[in-house]
Amino acid sequence: MKKKGKKGRKPELSTTQMISLSFLSAILVGAALLMLPCSTVPGEETDFLTALFTATTSVCVTGLVVVDTFSHWTLFGQIVIMLLIQVGGIGVVCLSAVLLILIHKRLSLKTRVLMMDSFNLDSIKGVAGFCQRVVRDIFIVEGIGAILSAFVFVPEFGNTKGIYVSIFHSISAFCNAGIDVIGPDSLCRYSGNYFILFVTMMLIVLGGLGFVVWFDVANAVGAFFSKAEGRKRFRLHEQTKLVLALTAVLIVSGAMLTFLAEMDNPATMQSMSLGAKIWNSFFQSVTFRTAGFMTVSQKGLREVTALFGLMYMFIGGSPMGTAGGVKTVTFFALMLYAISFLRDREKPVVFNRSFSIETIRKAVAIILISFLVTSLLSIMLMFTDHGILMTDALFETFSATATVGLSRNLTSTLTPAGRMIIITAMYLGRIGPISLVMFFRGQKAKKNLLISAEGKYYMG
């Protein structure tokens, strides 16, 4: 007989394991649906690896594709992809909980804890209401995005298809997926359409800010228009101020670097007007940080642009949003800690609030493990797919683990082994490499009561 857990019960799955398995389940269901004959246009074939890759890139809101979404999949297949993107953007746990609430089912304590962990919240209090508000506001923003996009797509594609393309585009942009049903060159044909560039960028940025920031800003706006007493009482949370500041700095700095590197590049922006160069530089800066749409050839980018783009991919969006990467606050916390060490300060401080040592430890673990995993996957990709240039391999794997979705025309040429590596990278990027470690570790480990004597180690 197999031994059971304590008191004869089987050991329960941890919340990390349940969240990881929920995304894996969604991917497998999506792959099964995409393998149905009705998902593929006549004359094309979809093998399991192609279906698995497409389902993974959709649920993980990455955007890397091995077949053209607009030409390989039927309307049914495209709708499956769109729904997978939506599920991945909202989160399987949150969406499931909201469905239970809608059918008037009581949420168990375990479900509430699972919801709390899926959003990295500090308390279980009000988690059901938070989740409902997240889903409601996502649909509102995506709806507004679809309406605005329709002003461009309806005249071009007609009423029915134009509305469909607008909805697909809005969901994909807000969820930072970068998958489109427009054509083989993403948004390159709209590089001179500043309206659609602005709408797309706003959707991407809003999705990447994080839901806590949304609600905090909404409360601030409400307080501003309320009585004078309300204005005095309400202050933006330090997380909100930091996220907004970091987002602005990253967008502007990325745009400046892109403009300087690409303004005279004949493969990207040389033929554009000054206004178009500025707009497309901002778009490239935004899309580098987990969006996946492109208005210029990524293969045509200069080496220097591709290399600093890796850093922006790695940083990604902000916590508790639809974007990937190690997150803006995580990266900033580590950089600030290094500066504090050089200035001989015990703790890093921003907006008169210090980062706890536990937060710094978590930031170190996230960044170190993410970087090591991404680097290892890059090396594996170059081993399995001989002839790949190092820049292209790094661009592909950083894009996958950060759930960005940009590629230097490499994805569709990958061998089966290379595709499996990128599938693994996308999945790890969505659940987080640390989650994988915790997945195999199981339940939270007990604290080590044994205190070891300090060793004498030399560094630097």
Image (cartoon, helix red, strand yellow):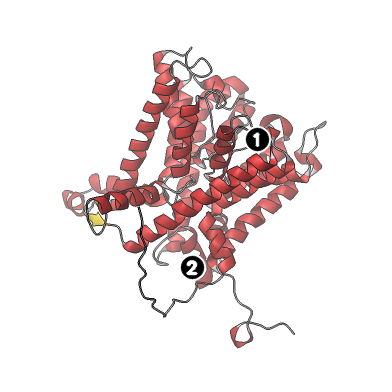
Observer-nearest of 429 and 450: 450
Q: Secondary structure at mark 2?
A: helix
> Is 166 placed above or below 89 here?
above
Spatial CA span between label 2 and label 1: 38 Å
- Which numbered dot is residue 43? none
Q: Residue at x 64, y 56 (%)?
A: 24
Q: Amino acid at mark 2?
A: Val
Q: Residue at x 65, y 36 (%)?
A: 65
| Residue found at the far bottom of this picture | 7
Residue 176 percent location from the top left of the image: 51, 40
Image quarter in which the N terminus is found = bottom right
- Which numbered dot is residue 113? 2
Residue 155 percent location from the top left of the image: 57, 20
Q: Is residue 357 left or right of residue 424?
A: left
Observer-nearest of 30 and 348: 348
Q: Residue at x 53, y 28 (%)?
A: 294
- Please rate how many residues cluster around mark 1, counting C-alpha atoms within 10 Å: few if below 14, some from 14 to 19, many from 20: many
Observer-nearest of 180 and 307: 307
Task: Specify which label sits upstream in the sequence, 2 or 1.
Answer: 2
- Please rate how many residues cluster around mark 2, counting C-alpha atoms within 10 Å: few if below 14, some from 14 to 19, many from 20: some
**Tag count in the figure?**
2
Residue identified by numbered label 1: 411
> Is 172 placed above or below 338 here?
above
